[in-house]
Amino acid sequence: MPSLTSVDAFDSGILLGAGAAERLIDHARQCYAAARRVETPAAVRTLPMPRTPHVNPGQGGQV
């Protein structure tokens, strides 16, 4: 399945029912549609900072 975090990668495969799979794909489309391109260090500096760090289980730590 297309990655939810990277446009040039794929996430691990999972087994879903048809309805759940449709909702997941719709969610990914909405995330990409709401995104904006960030291509320069100046553009990165304008992004809002997260209020609190969150745990990312896939990376084994906080980001």
Image (cartoon, rainbow, N blue to C red):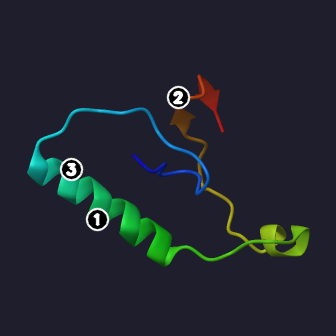
Residue 26 numbered tag: 1
Mark pair 2, 1: CA separation: 22 Å
Circle 1 residues within 10 Å: few <14, some 14–19, many ≥20: few
Closer to the observer: label 2 or label 3?
Answer: 3
Determine contact: label 2, label 1, CB under 8 Å.
no
Q: Secondary structure at mark 3?
A: helix
Determine contact: label 3, label 1, CB under 8 Å.
no
Q: What amino acid does circle 3 point to?
A: Ala
Looking at the image, tell me whether mark 3 or mark 1 is earlier in sequence order: 3
Residue 15 % position (x, y):
22, 33
Name the outermost residue toward the right. 41
Figure quadrant of the C terminus: top right
Mark pair 2, 3: CA separation: 21 Å
Does residue 32 appear to the left or right of 51 in the view shown? left
**What residue is shown at x 63% (from left), y 32% (from top)?**
62
Residue 46 % position (x, y):
78, 75
* Tag 3 residue: 21
Circle 3 residues within 10 Å: few <14, some 14–19, many ≥20: few
**What residue is shown at x 86% (from left), y 71% (from top)?**
40
Residue 53 % position (x, y):
61, 42
Quadrant of residue 51 within the rendered picture: bottom right
Q: What amino acid does circle 2 point to?
A: Gly
* Tag 2 residue: 58
Closer to the observer: label 2 or label 1?
Answer: 1
